[in-house]
Image: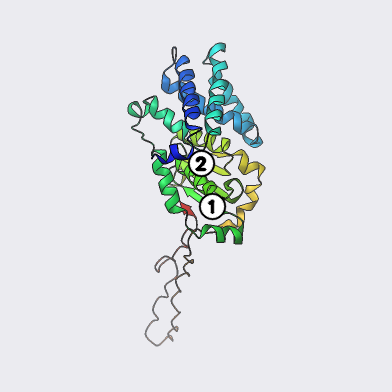
Amino acid sequence: MNFEEHEFSGDARQAEQHRKALIKLIGLNSHRHSTWEVFSDFCEMSALAISNGVDLPQREKREARYLEIVKRYSREEVERFPQMLGELVETLECGPDDVLGKVFHELELHNKYKGQFFTPYHVCRMMAKMTLTDDVRPLIEERGFVTAQEPACGSGAMVIALAHAMRDEGINYQQRLHVTATDLDSRCVHMAYVQLSLLHVPAIIQHGNTLSLEEFGRWHTPAHILGGWQWKIRPSRHNATLTDEKPEAPAALPAPEPVAAPDETPAKVIQTPTQAEPMQRRKPQQLTLF
């Protein structure tokens, strides 16, 4: 028996109906615009609308971007975008899922642009359950929450699956989990931000390059801002881990050698930390979804 059908047997059909309605609305706006453009604009406009309600420091710039996108559409087309968001909300009301990832594939956008393929949600759920160990509850009891890192978040499926797994274990992910997720593709950033915002996951979604550590933008979910997580996670670099692994102690510096007298053999050069082997870095203490 399919795990998702077994768990959401009453809601699965409704979720599919709302997802199909979302796809239909995207199609209606695709007569004068490409499907890729409509889908991308829907995700970005939804992200901008949600962000502008809570992230005040970035509101002016993002509101200007929102109006720039709207200008490309007729009045009738613009009125369909809130309907699309409504269908997305209704779909997620049926249960946590990677709705936008599924829509992306059903519209066959993954075949035409950049060769992007998102991990199927049932695979993400399996990985999340394997990652969520018995150590989580003691860590939450000790520190109050755990953190997770997603270096290539895509549409946010892995993070959604993690929240789903925590909910199944009776853990309130909206209060006990904070996520930092990154992706190089701005459209993926918008997709992940919208879905995590609607599921009320405290998260920072970074538009950036995980390998080069470049960052081009940052999106804070409403749960992050309203929950005061900017203060909670400040000391979390030394906080909860999802493993029993202890931080490694820094490598000891070589002891200085005695300085030779002027008439003796010259003393050896003392190695400084920059000349010696690099000090070992403290291993990350977060759940890594990769």
Mark 1 falls on what kind of element?
strand
Mark 2 falls on what kind of element?
strand
Residue 286: assigned label: none
Q: Position of residue 23 (x, y in %)?
A: 45, 22
Q: Is residue 236 visible in this depiction of the protein?
A: yes
Q: Total of numbered circles in the picture?
A: 2
Occupied quadrant, residue 277:
bottom left
Q: Position of residue 180 (x, y in %)?
A: 52, 46
Q: CA distance from mark 1 to mark 2?
A: 15 Å
Residue at (45% x, 62% y) in the render: 281
Q: Is residue 289 visible in this depiction of the protein?
A: no
Q: Amino acid at mark 1?
A: Thr
Q: Residues within 10 Å of mark 2 (few under 14, many from 20)?
A: many
Frontmost residue, 92 versus 103: 92
Residue at (44% x, 36% y) in the render: 5
Q: Which residue is mark 1?
A: 147
Q: Which residue is mark 2?
A: 206
Occupied quadrant, residue 64:
top right
Frontmost residue, 50 versus 4: 4
Q: Position of residue 214 (x, y in %)?
A: 46, 44
In-image side of 241 versus 229 (left or right): left
